[in-house]
Structures are given as C-alpha cells and as structure tokens.
Amino acid sequence: MKKTLLFGISAVLFTINANAVEYKPYVSAKLNYSKMDNTAKFTNSFGPLSASQEYNVDDDVVGGSLAGGIKINFVRFELEGNLHQKAEKTVAGTNASIENNSIMFNTYIDIPTNTLFTPYIGFGSGIAIVRAKDPEINLSKTNANFAWQAGVGTAVEVTKNIAVDLGYRYVDNGSSTLSSKEANYMGVNVSQKGKLKLRSNEFYLGMRYTF
C-alpha cells in the first residue's frame, strides 16, 4: 500500500513538473557594431639578431548574425552564426586587414520582471574563422580559433511573439600567427613573424520571433 501511494505521489509530481516546463523555439537576427581591439606583435629576424614591436590593429566594423534556439522556462539555448566586415588599418606603413566570422553556441538567462522589459545575461563559446593579411610583406593566414563571449542585454516585448533585443557583449576570438618565408639577403637569413590577439566590444540591435 505504501509503495503504491509513493508511486502515485511520484507520478503526480512528475506530471506537474513536466507540465510546468515550457519549450518555446525561436529565431533571431541582429545587427552588430564592433569596436575591434586587436594587438599585433611582429618580430623581424636578421640572422642571429631579432627585433620586436607591438601595434594596435583596431577598427570599427559592422556585421550581422542569425540564430535559432529554444527557450526552456527562463533559460535560452541557441546556435548563432556571425559575419563581420573586414577590419583594416595601416600598420608600420603597410595595409593590414583582419576578417573574422564565427559559429557560437550561446546560453542566456532571462530575468523576469512582469513588464515589457526582460533583462538577461549571456555567455557562449564556439569557433572563429580568422583571416589575417598583410599584402605589403606577403603575410597571410587563416586560422580556426576557439572563441568565447559574454554580455548583457534586454528584450522589449513588442507583441506576444516578437521582441526587440538590445545588448552588449565582449568577444574573444583567440590568437593568430603569421610568418613569412625565410629569405636570404646579402648572405643573411631574413624572416618575419607576427602574432595577433583578437578582441572586440560589440553592441547589437536585433529582433527575436518566438513560436
């Protein structure tokens, strides 16, 4: 009898918990404004001698993203694809460019307020495809880097299914290395290597449709 009663209570509680969980798929699109904060360290080697110098390769670029996900109560899980404009800057007399696109898996935690505004915090990780190029010295490299991001934002409910997103996130797209082929100049081996650290502060405005 006790086993039967316990089984019945467990079944009821499981049913209540199952009914309390809400699964809501959604899609979203964002426009991004990124303040790139990239640094580059170049090392020139002349035989046994070498010299290094650091530069800022920062730029302001725009981009966009598309995502699809599912909301489970107040937590959202999504897969997001990001495309960004190429960042370009003249460094030490040469025209350097950095282009990065990414695929990220994000988690957001919504904070209910019982109003039209729903603030949230979010974080994510994934892969960034980074292409760095300096045509003046024939350096070019494409890397697939581990990337991560974290930020905050708020959603404004427009209709039952549509919300406008406004937020900020810090993005770390890892590091990339460049190296030129070793050349011989007047009997001395000459080469150049560069290491880039890729960071950005990103502000975005988007729209989310929940089914």
Image: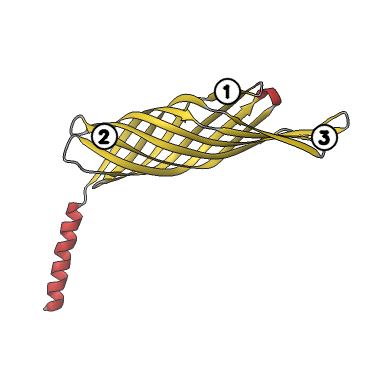
What's the amino acid at mark 3?
Asn
State which tag comes first along the sequence, 2 or 1. 1
Q: Residue at x 79, y 37 (%)?
A: 49
Residue 68 appears at what percent x and percent y? 34, 38
Residue underneath mark 2: 155
| Quadrant holding the N terminus | bottom left
State which tag comes first along the sequence, 3 or 1. 1
> Label 2 to label 3, Cα distance in Å?
58 Å
Label 3 SS: strand
Residue 44 appears at what percent x and percent y? 73, 33
| Quadrant holding the C terminus | top left
What's the amino acid at mark 1?
Lys
Say whether residue 171 is left or right of residue 90.
left
Q: Nearer the viewer, residue 165 or 47?
A: 47
* Viewer-side label of 2, 1: 1
> Label 2 to label 1, Cα distance in Å?
35 Å
Is residue 211 shown to the viewer in this render? no
Is residue 58 shown to the viewer in this render? yes
Q: Please say if the residues under marks 3 and 1 sit with CB atoms less than 8 Å apart.
A: no
Q: Which mark is residue 89?
A: 1
Q: Which mark is residue 189?
A: 3
Q: Please say if the residues under marks 2 and 3 sit with CB atoms less than 8 Å apart.
A: no
Residue 56 appears at what percent x and percent y? 57, 29
What's the amino acid at mark 2?
Ala
Q: Residue at x 40, y 28 (%)?
A: 32
Q: Which mark is residue 203?
A: none
State which tag comes first along the sequence, 2 or 3. 2
